[in-house]
Image (tube, helix red, strand yellow):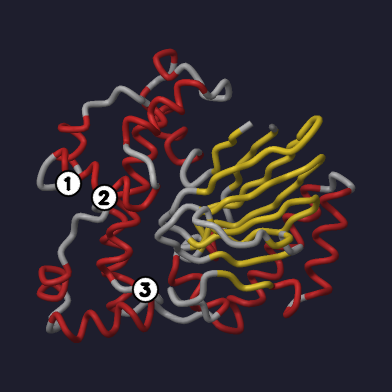
Amino acid sequence: MHYLEFRPDVRLSHLVRDYWQVDEYHGIGQEEHRFMPERLVRLTFYAGTTWRGSLTGGDLTPMPAASLEGLTLTPLRAVSIGSTKALGVELYPWGARQLFGWDFSVSTLDLSLTHPLLARAVSALLRLDAWDEARQLLEDWLLGLLAERGREPGAGIRAAETLYNSLGQARIGRLAEKLNLSQRQLERQFAAEVGVNAKTLSRLIRFEEIHNRLWLDPNVSLAQLAYELGFADQAHLTREFKALSFMTPRSFGQFVQLDPSRLPTHLLTQDQIAELGVSRSGRAFALK
């Protein structure tokens, strides 16, 4: 698998965390991926053959050429065959709300229906391996949406930014005091501007942090991790991780140790480990 990340234009950096691209070939047969819940909204342009759906059952549906997938509280399943290429954008939820009208009640938007020409153009460029051209086309489109729909951040977005910076540990009541609002006022503004309530976003931020730490070090102390992330105790962390992933932290750690794509982090510097933690954030893992 060939995976790369890119920073967005500085004009988009308050709404977009990064761009990413994946070029992967699945050999004989099919390969199943599981997408863990994540703290960002994912915009994906796709070329290939993949079906996706809920891990809890139900029919799989074809992956559209362009889709916006919101925050979820359960893992998702995808099955791929042959060559798959994807160009993605990781949006902060308020970015997805401003640019696309997203909110937490919308699990997936098929943008190939609302923006068919763009979806076909980007998909065609991916098939030609014209990654730079595809990314530039995508960024120009996002900049156009920003000029048309962007707005200054309000108290809700500022509170959400604090949640991300505190790894989900900031309390809405204290944030309201700092912003000179009542808690009820801030909760309303948060949901209106960010598209999801603070409690749900906090859960997802902390879950993904656990996921990332386990990816870097499958044998990390869960008791220490619970303390650092503000859980009552290790049992609380384990229950929360299992509720969102359908796996215990130790089960996930055992799987990570079997993944041949995982880098030997003991050979990396702390800066490299920190960067790897960002690049692994929200990615799928494969079940072959």
Instruction: Please give left or right for residue 114 compared with residue 162 in the image.
Output: right
Q: Residue 258, percent across and down?
A: 50, 21
Amino acid identity at mark 3:
Val
The picture quadrant where one finds residue 278 is top left
x 15%, y 48%: residue: 230
Q: Nearer the viewer, mark 3 or mark 1?
A: 1
Amino acid identity at mark 1:
His
Distance Cα–Cα, label 3 vs label 1? 23 Å
**Badge 2 or badge 3: first in the primary sequence:** 3
Classify mark 1: helix, strand or loop: helix
Q: Nearer the viewer, mark 2 or mark 3?
A: 2
Distance Cα–Cα, label 2 vs label 3? 19 Å
Question: Which mark is drawn over residue 240?
Answer: 2
Q: Residue 187, percent across and down?
A: 23, 80
Please give the residue where the numbered disc 3 appears in the rendered image.
196
Q: Residue 75, percent across and down?
A: 47, 52
Q: Residue 163, percent across and down?
A: 27, 60
Question: Which mark is drawn over residue 236?
Answer: 1
Amino acid identity at mark 2:
Glu
The 10 Å Cα crowd at callout 2, few under 14, some 14 to 19, many 20 or more, is some
Judged from this view, the residue extending furthest toward the top is: 267
**Badge 3 or badge 1: first in the primary sequence:** 3
The picture quadrant where one finds residue 38 is bottom left
x 74%, y 55%: residue: 46
Q: Looking at the figure, which quarter contains the C terminus?
A: top right
Instruction: Please give left or right for residue 166 compared with residue 39 in the image.
Output: left
Q: Is residue 59 above or below residue 278?
A: below
